[in-house]
Amino acid sequence: MGTSEPPPHLPWSTDRELDAGIAARHLASVAPDLAIDWLTWVGRGWDADVWRAGPLAFRFPRRRDAHGGSPWEDRLLVELAPALTGLGVRVPTPLRTLPPSEHFPYPVAVRGWVEGRAAPTGPGRLPLDALRTLGRALGVVHALPVARALELGVPTEQWILADRVAETEADLPRLRASEWGTHPLIEASVRAFEEVAREVAAVGPAAAPTAPIHGDLVADHVLLDTGASDSEDAALVGLIDWADASIGDPADDFLAIAAEWGDEGLDATLGAYGRGSDAAFRRRVVLAARATVLHWMHDDLLEGLDPGPALRRIRTVLDLRA
C-alpha cells in the first residue's frame, strides 16, 4: 500500500502511536474488503487524525477518551443531511465503524469524503454569498428540536458566557508569562476581556437558549468549492468535523465567524440566519468572542503553533462592534 506521511505529531496530545504504516496495517487487517492501495494523511485535530483513501475518510482517535466518530454523531449527520444538502452544503456520510485490532487500539469511523477547500481566514476574504449560506445552514442545525436531538443521543454541554470567562481566567497567568504576554494586542485583549468579566459578574450566570450546535465551526471545518476560479465566486459546499456537536448555546456557533471574518462576516451570517438573532444575541456573540480569543491564543502557544493567526483573530475581535 502506498502512503504519504504527516509531519511529526505532538506526543502530549495523544496516548497511542500512529503513522502511515500503522494506519495501513490496521485498515488491511479489519477492512480487507476496502482494498485500499493508497492512504494520505489529511490532518489532525484535538480528537482524531484523519486519513483519506479516494472517496473515504478515516478518523483515528488520538486518545482513549476521544472518538473518531460515535453513534449519536452518525445519527445527527443522517438527520441533518437532507436539509443541508438542499442548501448545497454537504456533511460527512457515516458509512461504518471499524473495530480495534492489534495494530490500533480504538474504533475508527469511516466517512464519505467531502470535497472542498478550507475557507480563507481574515475579514473580507470569505465571499458574502458563502457567509449567507453558512447562516442558513446554521439556521437548519439550530432548528432541530432539542427533544429530537436528545432522542438521537446528542450530548448536552450547556456552556454559558461565565464558563468561557472562567476558562480564560485560568489561562491568563501562563499567557502573560509567555514571550507574547506583553504584545500590544495581547494587552489590549486582556483589557477587553476584563471588561467582559466585570459585565458577566454583574449580570450573573443566566442560562443561554439551547439548541443543537456544531460546536467547532472554525475555518478549517467550513469548505468552499474547489472548482471556483476565483475565491470571490467560491460557494460554501461543506461543513465537517461534527465531533464537538452538542445541545448548547447557539451563539457558540458564531464565535469563530466573528473572530475570523469580523463585523461584515458576522452581519452577513446573522442576516441569513433568521432565528431570533437580535441585538442582544449579537452582543452575546461579541462578548463570548472577546472572552475566548485569549484562550485560543493560549492553546496555540501551548501546542507550539505560529501565533500569527491567533493575533490576527484577536485584532479582528477587538475591532468588532459591541
Image (tube, grey):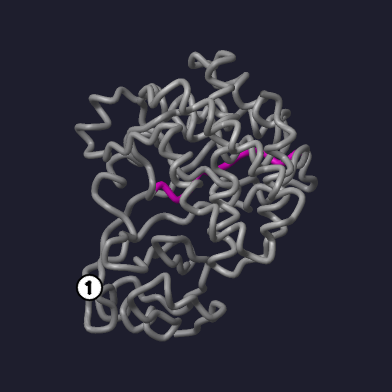
Residue tagged by mark 1?
100
Q: Find residue 233 and report its image quarter.
A: top right
Q: 289 or 202: which is nearer to us? A: 202
**What residue span does the magenta drawing correspond to?**
233-242
Kind of residue sitting beneath label 1: Pro
The spot of residue 26 in percent (x, y) is 31, 79
The spot of residue 55 in percent (x, y) is 47, 61
Q: Which residue is rendered at x = 39% and y = 24% of the image?
A: 208
The spot of residue 256 in percent (x, y) is 58, 41
Dot 1: element: loop
Q: Which residue is rendered at x = 33% and y = 51% of the image?
A: 94
The N terminus sits in image quarter: bottom left
Q: Is residue 205 above or below residue 76?
A: above
Q: Which residue is rendered at x = 80% and y = 45% of the image?
A: 230
Q: Is residue 84 left or right of residue 101?
A: right
Q: Is residue 240 magenta?
A: yes
Q: Is residue 77 above or below residue 227?
A: above
